[in-house]
């Protein structure tokens, strides 16, 4: 083919001059046909490349979504586990609060009983002292 940067060789110039208009028309038609064929091939290659790029982009997007969803799903499962643990701990704390209240009530009852025993012991000492005083007074009266 002729390129504007390179001059035609002499043999080509002779061919060009000796060609008939029919040969020229056939050459032009062949050039046009080759141009359409190469344009069609380029368009087809571009379309295939575009479809391949779209398919690859879809795969990448799916992989990214799977990667992100995997982390989200794991976080969701962990959140559910934590919520179950929180409920279990709340139930345990409630049970311990009730048990502590029972222990406090029992210790308060014991303290009250000990105080009453202490009061009774004090009353008994007072009574013993009074009885001894009365006994001593009766002995003094009896000896006189």
Image: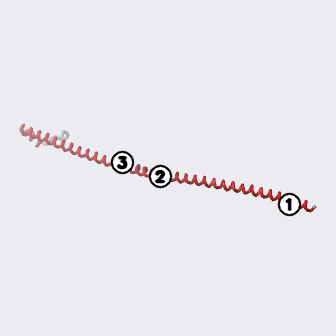
Residue under numbered circle 3? 65
Nearer-the-camera pick, 46 or 101: 101
Task: Give SS at disc 2.
Answer: helix
Q: Is residue 136 left or right of residue 120?
A: right
Residue occupying image coordinates x 6% and y 38%: 22
Mark 1 and mark 2 residues within 8 Å of each other at the beta carbon: no
Task: Give SS at disc 1.
Answer: helix
Q: Is residue 34 depicted above or below 117 in this figure?
A: above
First in sequence: mark 3 or mark 2? 3
The quadrant in which residue 132 appears is bottom right
Residue occupying image coordinates x 19% and y 44%: 41
Q: Is residue 21 left or right of residue 135?
A: left
Q: Quadrant of the N terminus?
A: top left
Residue under numbered circle 1? 135
Q: Position of residue 2 (x, y in %)?
A: 16, 41
Q: Which circle, 3 or 2, is nearer the viewer?
A: 2
Task: Give SS at disc 3.
Answer: helix
First in sequence: mark 1 or mark 2? 2
- Circle 3 crowding by C-alpha within 10 Å: few under 14, some 14–19, many from 20: few
Nearer-the-camera pick, 61 or 82: 82
Q: Is residue 132 left or right of residue 120?
A: right
Q: Is residue 26 left or right of residue 101?
A: left
Q: CA distance from mark 3 to mark 1?
A: 102 Å
Q: CA distance from mark 1 to mark 2?
A: 75 Å
Q: Quadrant of the C terminus?
A: bottom right
First in sequence: mark 3 or mark 1? 3
Nearer-the-camera pick, 78 or 125: 125
């Amino acid at each position: 083919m002729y390129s504007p940067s390179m001059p035609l060789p002499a043999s080509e110039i002779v061919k060009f001059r000796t060609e008939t208009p029919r040969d020229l028309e056939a050459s032009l038609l062949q050039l046009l046909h080759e141009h359409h064929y190469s344009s069609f091939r380029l368009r087809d290659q571009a379309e295939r490349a575009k479809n391949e790029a779209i398919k690859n982009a879809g795969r990448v997007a799916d992989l990214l979504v799977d990667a992100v969803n995997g982390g989200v799903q794991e976080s969701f499962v962990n959140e559910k586990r934590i919520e179950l643990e929180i409920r279990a701990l709340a139930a345990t704390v409630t049970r311990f609060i009730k048990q502590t209240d029972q222990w406090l009530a029992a210790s308060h009852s014991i303290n009250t009983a000990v105080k009453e025993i202490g009061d009774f012991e004090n009353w008994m000492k007072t009574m013993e002292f009074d009885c001894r005083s009365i006994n001593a007074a009766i002995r003094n009266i009896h000896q006189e």
